[in-house]
Amino acid sequence: IGAVFRSYGLGLIIASLLIRLVTFPLTRKTAIQSELINKAKPEMDRIEKKYENKTDSDSMMKKSQELAMVYKKFNINPISGCLFSFIQLPIFIAFLEAINRIPAIFEENMFGIHLGTSPSIAIANGNWWYLLIIAFVGLTTYFSFKNTSTVGNDETARQTKMMTNGFLVMIIVMSIFMTSALGIYWATSNLFTIVQQYIIKRRMK
């Protein structure tokens, strides 16, 4: 793709979008499930509050049954909402390997950014504009997570939020040391997610 467009930076962005289009059926399910959970949340919260201090087996069974009825009512399938999360990391690793095997990417500059240089090395040499890569990766990752909802009680929600924040910090730290090419891939993928979530949310209103 880079050879066709005579720009490996542009080729990188197009390849990122093509990967997301291929995985679109899975990511669409994840986004739809998130919106369905948002719609069902008032009823799930009511059930959680109803059985808040009841830990006996009979109450737990009734709670599970009532939650199952809410899941059925709103067509919520918690497993399908996690599918893309399972395949995202292997795709990320595969794309990293692909970038590392294409020397032309490491030799190219795009918008004053050398694709084969990490922000940490560039900043150490006084090229402060590479901070934009870190900021871009951080912001797009944050907004791609912002509208994601999970099934569970308040404690589960808190734990999920902690894990999400931890993952966000990890990605930002990684973006400092990974090549700018990989940062552009990750940010492009996040932008696709943000746009997809926005479109699905509008259609489901």
Image (cartoon, rainbow, N blue to C red):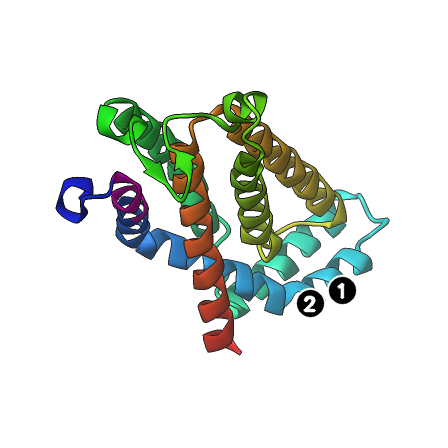
Disc number at residue 103? none
Nearest to the observer: residue 153 or residue 95? 95
Q: Is residue 194 magenta?
A: no
Crowdedness of circle 1 by 10 Å Cα count: few (<14), some, many (20+)? few
Nearest to the observer: residue 93 or residue 40? 93
> Circle 1 — which element?
helix
Q: Report the side of 30 relative to 163 (left or right).
A: left
In which image quadrant can residue 29 be found? bottom left
Count numbered badges in the picture. 2
**Which contiguous range is marked in magenta?**
8-13
Q: Amino acid at mark 1?
A: Arg
In which image quadrant can residue 184 be found? top left
Q: Report the side of 28 relative to 132 (left or right).
A: left
Residue 20 placed where, x, y %? 33, 50
Residue 121 placed where, x, y %? 51, 21
Determine contact: label 1, label 2, CB under 8 Å: yes
Q: Residue at x 68, y 61 (%)?
A: 44
Residue 144 placed where, x, y %? 53, 52
The answer, for residue 53, to whether it is visible in the render is: yes
Q: Residue at label 2?
A: 43
Nearest to the observer: residue 5 or residue 76? 5
Q: Report the side of 7 relative to 188 (left or right).
A: left
Q: Is residue 11 magenta?
A: yes
Q: CA distance from mark 1 to mark 2?
A: 5 Å
Specify the quadrant that holds the N terminus.
top left
Q: Residue at label 1?
A: 46
User: Is residue 115 placed above or below 50 in the rendered structure?
Assistant: above
> Circle 2 — which element?
helix
The answer, for residue 102, to whether it is visible in the render is: no
